[in-house]
Amino acid sequence: MILQVDYWALIGSFFNWVAESGAIMMVLSGFMAITWLGFERKRRGSFTKRKAEEEFDVTKFLRGLSYLGLILGILVVWSGVTSLILDISPSFDYARLNPGVNPPGDGEANHFTSIFLIVIGTTMFFKPISDLPLASIIGLLAGTATAFVIALIVPDWAVNLIAGVINPKWILVIIFIIITVIVAISVKFYIGVLKAISKFLSWPPIAFVIMIFCLVQGFALWIFGVSIFGFNIL
């Protein structure tokens, strides 16, 4: 008998676990900040230098850890967003010590931790893709998707009507170019801001502070069920 596995249920369970494990995500973020220390110190040639050296040959190990941060960043953001929206506690001990209005065991979210996870997760995501033309890629995808959707939803009679004036294919090309340029320019601006924040947070002295904070806050929530910052919005 072949063992049948509901992969969607497993994926759903995994993301539910991530949402309920803000403390663990904080600890993992702290360990990722340690890799920033090594990566950025080697790239800049100093612990405190603000600008990178001209020549830089990072080890494959550090580069691999950096790209691992992209995946971890997505999970950390997911944990922060879902815990903030659904009011989920970062750990079971924190839920026990801070019972909320949710079902038993859910407790109450620590808003400071949730917001910090969103910020640090975004930093992890954008750090390894700083050299990719992400704005252009997103612009091309948006332009392609728009042209494809228009080609699907425009009725045949409208196509025939337009064909009497201009080739419909040229209209799709023009729409594709316009959407691609507009989206690419818009995304480039916002991504530039996020990349600047990511670069600042990964500067070794800042990364060192982040590392200490993440590890202390993460283990405090995970093991003792307390937060070094009790800040909550509501």
Image (tube, rainbow, N blue to C red):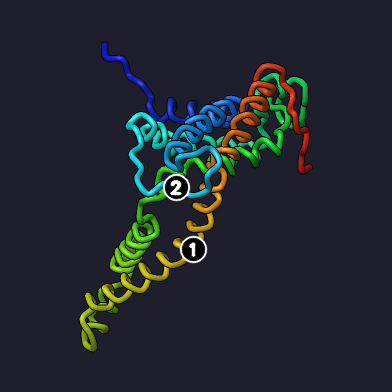
Mark 2 Cα shell of 10 Å, populated few (<14), some (14-19), many (≥20)? some
Q: Nearer the viewer, residue 158 or 172?
A: 172
Residue tagged 1: 189
Q: Amino acid at mark 1?
A: Phe
Say which residue appears at 36% left-offset and 42% top-offset.
56
Count numbered badges in the picture: 2
Q: Which mark is residue 52?
A: 2
Where residue 93 sits, quadrant-wise, is top right
Residue drawn at x 66%, y 32% is 88
Q: Secondary structure at mark 1?
A: helix
Is any part of residue 74 visible from this angle? no
Q: Is residue 148 above or below residue 103?
A: below
Distance (Cα) linking label 1 and label 2: 23 Å
Q: Point out residue 153 in the picture as x, y percentages from the top left corner.
A: 33, 67
Q: Position of residue 144 (x, y in %)?
A: 31, 62
Q: Secondary structure at mark 2?
A: loop
Q: Position of residue 145 (x, y in %)?
A: 33, 61
Task: Give the quarter of the figure containing the C terminus.
Answer: top right
96 relative to 141, above or below: above
Tag nearer the camera, 1 or 2: 2
